[in-house]
Image (cartoon, rainbow, N blue to C red):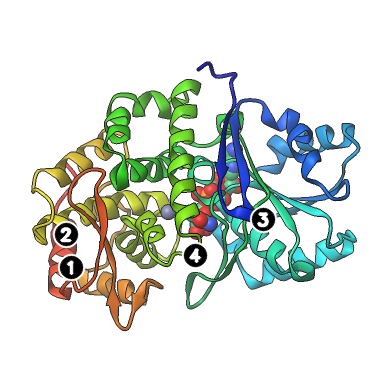
Amino acid sequence: MTSHEIDTINVDLAGRSYDIHIGIGLLEKAADYIAPLLKRPVTAIVTDDQVAPHFLDSLQRNLEAAGISNTSIVLPAGESTKSFAQLESLLAQLFEAKIERGDTIIALGGGVIGDLTGFAASIFRRGIDFIQVPTTLLAQVDSSVGGKTAINTSYGKNLIGTFHQPKLVLTDMATLDTLSQRQMLAGYAEVVKYGLINDARFFYWLGDNGERMLARDSQALQHAIAVSCRAKAIIVAADEREGGQRALLNLGHTFGHALEAATGYSDRLLHGEGVAMGMVMAFELSARLGLCDDSVAPIVKAHLDRVGLMTRPNQISDADFDAETLLGHMMQDKKVKQGEITFVVAQGIGQACLQSGVPDAMVKDVLEQALADSAH
Ligand SMILES: NC(=O)c1ccc[n+]([C@@H]2O[C@H](COP(=O)([O-])OP(=O)(O)OC[C@H]3O[C@@H](n4cnc5c(N)ncnc54)[C@H](O)[C@@H]3O)[C@@H](O)[C@H]2O)c1
Ligand SMILES: [Zn+2]
């Protein structure tokens, strides 16, 4: 495969099926993919003020050349944009632009823009079509696929949202050229996650190629993005609304979310950074449960350390929380059912499974050990 080839992955959901196209330079050819899906050649592009200067122009020019009208709506960058206030503002701007039920909204940006735009699309005039054009690695391998949409409230992250599948995911890897290395690494944690869930071969491939991928070698990137999307597409097709196995995608997330909450969802810890630490803890918990050999968690940690991710909470600046606080945050997680957390654990690399009934004391031990341990 050369980097000029395009990978196409179908998310098989009967009447709501759609394609993910992955390649280089797709933004300049966006209309070729988008036009056939439109009921009327009218779109609204939603993006943020950090993404717009890089990519909005080229998308707009391409759509215009194909006779597709497009209004652009530029929102502030950052997690705080996933709010009721910004949702209301976005909906108002869609009305002002006279977007109709048969028109299409295009989300151009990272997971924040994708989640908010998807939610707006699911409720605007009782639901209109939308397309994902993800521009962060995290969005390209995870958030743009699967139809989960959300905003945050003071009660927690992603607690208000819908399932609303996009009509298309158009992934142009060239957009990653302007992404910071820290954001690349945060997305990389989610890539590793797919290997750890059910694809040991991919985890070992990342051992050999992860650094090449993070250096933005296009062939390595395309392979990793395609493998990740294929893995997510299969899980979503089997369990669209997370009745069961889709929960495996939360590997490392229960621990990670607790760390994100303890750091106030701030710049001190990006989502993917929390997931990296959380995956190490999930394997340590698995070992304590007797599910997984003691030697596995250190292998996972060593890989994440080597590529430059943080793997221990004390690497977060001003880490001033204790195990009790983190446990408290874990109990707030939306995965808690009847006061009990279902953990994603593993029997080995590529052998993740779900486990309930884990004693709080054992979880606390894992947290205490992680807090006490320095990374290296
Ligand atoms: N829906 C899902 O299934 C799902 C899955 C995982 C994560 N999420 C959500 O995704 C969000 C995180 O997404 P994210 O990590 O993409 O964050 P993000 O959207 O905030 O993007 C990170 C930063 O990079 C900037 N940026 C985006 N693309 C860029 C580019 N190409 N060049 C330069 N800068 C660029 C953005 O403006 C932002 O400042 C969270 O809100 C999380 O809850 C959703
Ligand atoms: Zn995640």
Nearer-N-terminus badge (1/2): 2
Q: Which residue shows up at 27% across the image and 51% down it?
A: 279
Mark number, residue 277: none
Residues marked 3 and 2 touching at CB (< 8 Å): no
Residues marked 1 and 3 touching at CB (< 8 Å): no
Nearer-N-terminus badge (1/3): 3
Extreme-top residue of the structure:
2
Q: Quadrant of residue 266?
A: bottom left
Q: Circle 1 is placed at which residue position? A: 363
Q: Circle 3 is placed at which residue position? A: 76
* In this picture, residue 365 sits left or right of residue 241: left
The residue mark sitting in front, 3 or 2, is 2
Residues marked 4 and 2 touching at CB (< 8 Å): no
Amino acid under disc 1:
Val
Nearer-N-terminus badge (4/1): 4
The residue mark sitting in front, 4 or 1, is 4
Q: CA distance from mark 4 to mark 3?
A: 30 Å
Residues marked 4 and 1 touching at CB (< 8 Å): no
* In this picture, residue 261 sits left or right of residue 2: left
Q: CA distance from mark 1 to mark 2?
A: 7 Å
Is disc 2 surrounded by few (<14), some (14 to 19) or many (20+) residues within 10 Å? many
Mark number, residue 241: 4
Residues marked 1 and 2 touching at CB (< 8 Å): yes
Is disc 3 surrounded by few (<14), some (14 to 19) or many (20+) residues within 10 Å? some
User: Residue 43: horizontal and vertical position, in percent?
Assistant: 82, 49
The residue mark sitting in front, 4 or 2, is 4
Q: Secondary structure at mark 3?
A: loop
Q: Circle 2 is placed at which residue position? A: 285
User: Residue 256: horizontal and vertical position, in percent?
Assistant: 33, 59
